Amino acid sequence: MSLVSAKEMLQKAKAGKYAVGQFNINNLEWTKAVLLTAQECSSPVILGVSEGAGKYMCGYNTVVGMVKGMMETLGITVPVALHLDHGSYEGAMKCIEAGFSSVMFDGSHYPIDENIEKTKEIIRIAGEKGISVEAEVGSIGGEEDGVVGGGEVADPDECKQIADLGVDMLAAGIGNIHGVYPENWQGLNFDVLAQIQEKTGTMPLVLHGGTGIPEEMVKKAITLGVSKVNVNTECQLSFAAATRQYIEEGKDKQGKGFDPRKLLAPGTEAIKATVKEKMELFGSVGKA
Ligand code: 13P
């Protein structure tokens, strides 16, 4: 199956009251782990690529080639969207050109009028190619790829303004942040989420910063209209812990344990386990 836009899978998720996971990819092992798990779980999936990760993987054309090649060789038949995460205007244009099937334009740091103008332009260009668009209102807190967000709570009226432009999914800050949550975190603001959902109706809402949000909060957010949950740090932590264990147990020094195909295998399995756990929590298993 070739790459698909995220539009249809998210509309189905919204109607079915579950969420599709966006798992950020960083390299070949990450991509393989996420694709294989989605196939095993018969779940739709969104592969997220930040601009920094795109650069790390040698550019968007390389990413598109790797993902498409892998899907063919691994026989992936579940719906897969390849999505730019927190894209700049220029980054979104490059991904549209390179063959991504979905882009996020993060104009949350612009004044709302400028966010609207730029989002409109991206929707027009992406729309011509059937590429889905995510916009953001109220920047997500924390640090991701050097981009530090202040952790705002979105204004529901501004959310409606952006939703009405014709985006396919809307990320709105509701107290969520990227990375590990601090001890004194106040939790998600469900009152604001409910107001946003009321104003934006059937628009699939996106919850960024999926790492470390307590399960009950994630489930509640899904009942209030969240149809896409983004996870990045948690896969990185799982990968690092499993790789650390392998080395600390001296396995790289046994036989050919230093072979990268062996050395990276426990980390890859750990990513798969985390992705499966999230798909079960989000309710997307069996929904492909
Ligand atoms: P985490 O790294 O906190 O899981 O957030 C991921 C994310 O929101 C990507 O956009």
Image (cartoon, helix red, strand yellow):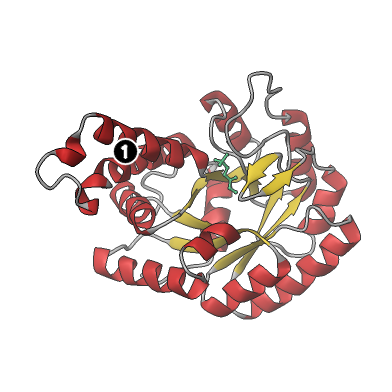
Q: Look at mark 1 in the image and give the residue it sits on.
A: 243
User: Disc count in the image?
Assistant: 1
- Left/right of residue 262 with respect to residue 120 in the rendered view: left
Determine if residue 285 is in view: yes
Residue reaching furthest front?
A: 253
Q: Does any atom of ligand 1 lie closer than 8 Å to the CB of label 1? A: no
Most distant residue in the left direction: 255
Q: Position of residue 271 (x, y in %)?
A: 36, 42
Tell me the quadrant of the picture where the C terminus can be found: bottom left
Indicate whether 252 appears above or below 54: above
Q: Secondary structure at mark 1?
A: helix
Q: Residues within 10 Å of mark 1 (few under 14, many from 20)?
A: some
Q: Furthest-top residue in view?
A: 184
> Residue 84's spot in the image, x, y percent?
58, 62
Q: Is residue 23 above or below residue 60?
A: above
Between residues 121 and 216, which one lies in front from this camera angle? 121
Quadrant for the N terminus in the image: bottom left
Residue at point 48% right, 38% down?
A: 282
Residue at the location (72% across, 71% down)? Answer: 122
- Mark 1: amino acid: Thr
Q: Position of residue 71 (x, y in %)?
A: 33, 66
Q: Quadrant of residue 120?
A: bottom right
- Foreground: 36 or 169? 36
Horizontally, is 75 left or right of 84 in the view?
Answer: left
Locate residue 93, reporting x and y percent: 65, 75
